[in-house]
Amino acid sequence: MTESHDPIAQIAEAAIKHMNSDHADAVLDYVRGLAGITWAKRALITRLDASGIEIQAIGDGRETTIFLPFEPPLTDTEQLRPVLVAMAQKARQLVSSEIWIESPLPIRSPELPQQLLNAIASRRSFALKELSPDPIDLEAVKLMLEAANWAPSHGQTEPWRFAVFSGDARHMLSEAFGTAFRLLNPDQPPGSSGEKSQRQRAWQAPVWIAIGMQPNPKRPEWEELIAVGCAVQNLHLIASALGLAGKWMSGGCAVHPHVAGAIGFAPETRLLGFFYVGRPVNHEWPRGRRRPLTEKVVWYSD
C-alpha cells in the first residue's frame, strides 16, 4: 500500500484518476504489451507508488491483477510522468508491431565446446527446502529469460510464455495454489493442512516463473511442447551458470487451469508448471551422475 513516506504519495491518487480517465488506452496497453495479457478489454490502475503500478485487467468474463515495477524505484514526483510516458511508448510498440531481436555473432574458440558441456553437466535441480528465501537480483532472471527466448521452435512459432512473480506478488500465487488444492481435493475441509502447505509454498522461493505454451494451429502440439522444454532448459542452464538453484515444478496445483487463469494466462495458453529459483542454502554445489552413454546409443557406419 502507499505509505506516507512514499515520495509520490501526495500525487498518487490524482495520478491514478488522471490515467484511468484520460489515458485509459495507455493503461490497457500496459497490461497487453508489457504483461502479455492479450485478452484484456479494460484496465484500471488500482495502486501507484514509488515501486510501481498495480493494474486490474478485465475481459472475456475474467479479471486479474498485475504489478509493473519501476526500475529503479522513483525518488521524487518529477520522475513519474516521464516514466509512465516511456512505459506507454514501449507498450504501444509491443502491441502494434512485431519486434524482432537479432542474434549476436557466434563466438568460436577451442575451449567453448568443453565449457558448454561443463555448464550442461553441472545443471542440477533443487528442492524448495534447499533454497534461501532471500531476494535475488531480477537482472539475473532477465538473463535467464533471454536465454529461454533463443530456444529453437519449428517454424519460429516461439510458443513459450512466462510470467514472473517475486516479492509481494507471490501472494497471487499463494491464493491460486490454495484454491487449486481445494478444487483438486473437494473432500478436504477449507483450511486443511494440505491447503496451507500449498499456500505457504509460494513463499519458499524468492522468484517463481510460470511456464506456458501458446498453441499454434499450424503446428502439432507435441512440437510446441518440445520447444517450451528447450526454452526452460536454456533458462535453467543460465540459472546454474549464475550459481542459482531452481527446478521446474510440473504437477498438481502447478498446472491446474484455475492457476493459469488466476495469473493472467490467455485461455488458450497451456500452463506447464513453474520454475522456481533462488540462492542455494548449501554453498557446495551438488554433483550429478548419469549411466554410461554406451547404454543409450547405437552407432551405424561404413
Image (tube, rainbow, N blue to C red):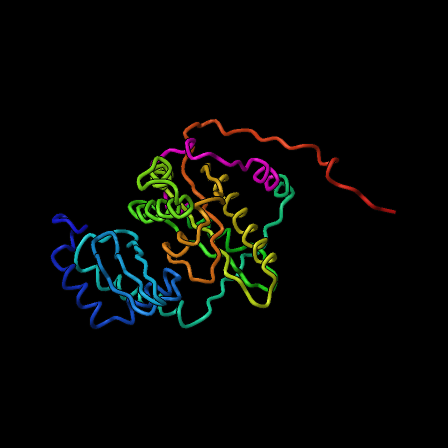
Residue 92, visible in the rendered structure: yes
Answer left or right for 124 relative to 282.
right
Report the residue that reaches farthest toward the right.
302
Membership of 137 in magenta stretch: yes
Q: Nearer the viewer, residue 273 or 198?
A: 198
Vertically, is 24 above or below 5? below
Membership of 123 in magenta stretch: yes
Vertically, is 22 above or below 228? below
Q: Nearer the viewer, residue 87 or 175?
A: 175
Answer left or right for 191 relative to 36.
left
Q: Position of residue 288 (x, y in %)?
A: 58, 31
Q: Give the residues in magenta.
A: 115-140
Residue 136, visible in the rendered structure: no
Q: Position of residue 172 (x, y in %)?
A: 32, 49
Q: Quadrant of residue 90?
A: bottom left
Q: Position of residue 226 (x, y in %)?
A: 59, 53
Report the residue that reaches farthest toward the front.
187
Task: Identify the residue shown where x is 46% and y is 57%.
Answer: 161
Q: How many marks?
A: 0
Q: Quadrant of residue 123?
A: top right
Q: Position of residue 215 (x, y in %)?
A: 53, 62
Task: Identify the residue shown where x is 26% and y is 57%.
Answer: 54
